Amino acid sequence: MSMWTRVLVLAALFITSALAAESYVVVRLLDPTATSAVLESGAVPIGHPDLEQDEILVYTTDEQLEKIQNEPNVAFVYPASAELISGVPVNSCTQPKSDLIAEYIWNVGHGWRLAGQTATRLTYSVQDFSPKLGKERTLEALSQALAEWTKYVQIDVTYDATPAGPRNLTVLFARGDHGDPYPFDGPRRTLAHTFYPGDVNPEPIAGDLHFDEDENWGSGVDPDFQSVVLHELGHALGLGHSDRPNAVMYPYYRRLGTLQPDDIAAIRRLYPARQDTQGTQTASPQVPAPPVQQPNRADRTPPTLRVLSPSTTLVSTSAATVRISGTASDTGGIERIAWSSSGGRSGVANGTTTWTIPDFALRVGDNSIVIRAYDTAGNTSWRNLTITRR
């Protein structure tokens, strides 16, 4: 079963009783140009400037909704939020559509929990801060959002100033092309994207949260960083999107500082509920904010890393192996070039400033490969490839 088939089958489970006899719904299309079938159902289209290009907001009856659901071009349908209905400005969580990211299913993979362990232990770090927020406000928002998720489940998260470690949620503010296949697009459209946990994505990209530095990040203004980071942390812990308009994990960001019942129920399907000594579910203590002061080292500039072959980040091939090569440079010198794959393999490339991964074995289907350069001061840069073996 293909990734898109799995998404559509699971998404169909959420076209549910949440939709009333007459209701406002969002219709996601496989082909965004083919809208006639939806409109011919008799549903009334409602315009909203912030809708995704492949979505239509309509007012529909049960009979019209049944026709829409049976259209082959309709991926799924979900209830519209009050913000969408009223026409107020919104931002969508436009998670990339690839094997690294899946949409509209509550649980993506099995999260970070290890077999035989009740409590899940993770670290988090910030690779690059945004001057619009500053270190103190960024770390405060992260601490509060992490505390909200860990209040309900047995996850312990501590701050680590070294973003290269395993099981680490690395936060990055960046503009445009920033090393993965999903470049940011400037103000107002894509605010952020997040990579799901290590059973879905390879280390070190697993769990990383990327925010578009071109956005007007601030406290109490739109986009509201506190609300966005609370939503994105849900993805980093293993949750997909929800079709419930009240939820933090609804695909259009909502100004919320606390989890809603649907969010809590979803995260407890991945991790055990937090309990006190009497077995009663209880809240965890606040995740302590880390010190603002970062390690004092002279060199904070990440190395330059280039992948020369393959020449694109998305590749389709019938070959059983592929040769990956490129270059890296840094004023202080390159220590090593490491790689990891979605199949659980990892290793070190041959060479440093000119490097090669010879005869990388491809499994049939999609292969996600993360390549990371380390300089002698501990700074890192990375690139991601997705190679599909036919």
Image (cartoon, helix red, strand yellow):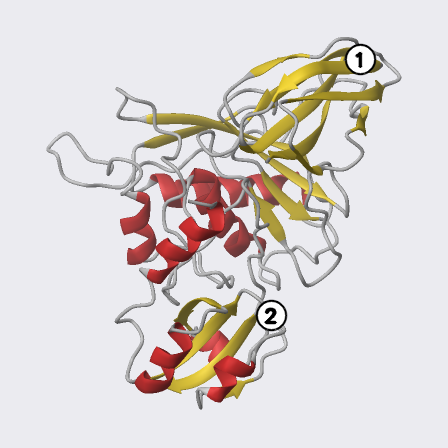
Q: Residue at x 69, y 63 (%)?
A: 188
Q: Amino acid at mark 2?
A: Pro
Q: Nearest the camera: 213 or 133?
A: 213
Question: Which residue occupies the extreme right position in the image?
Answer: 331
Q: Position of residue 114 (x, y in %)?
A: 34, 23
What whole-number distance in Å separates the C-alpha atoms at marks 1 and 2?
46 Å
Q: Amino acid at mark 1?
A: Ile
Q: Position of residue 127 (x, y in %)?
A: 66, 31
Q: Position of residue 274 (x, y in %)?
A: 24, 36
Quarter the C terminus occupies: top right
Q: Position of residue 99 (x, y in %)?
A: 54, 41
Instruction: Give the total number of marks visible in the rendering.
Output: 2
Which mark is in front, 1 or 2? 2
Left or right, residue 153 beside residue 130:
left
- Mark 2 or mark 1, which is nearer the start of the sequence? 2
Q: Which residue is mark 2?
A: 32
Q: Which mark is drawn over residue 225?
A: none
**Regarding mark 2 in the picture, which secondary structure is present there?**
loop
Q: Residues within 10 Å of mark 1 (few under 14, many from 20)?
A: many
**Regarding mark 1 in the picture, which secondary structure is present there?**
strand
Q: Which mark is drawn over residue 334?
A: 1
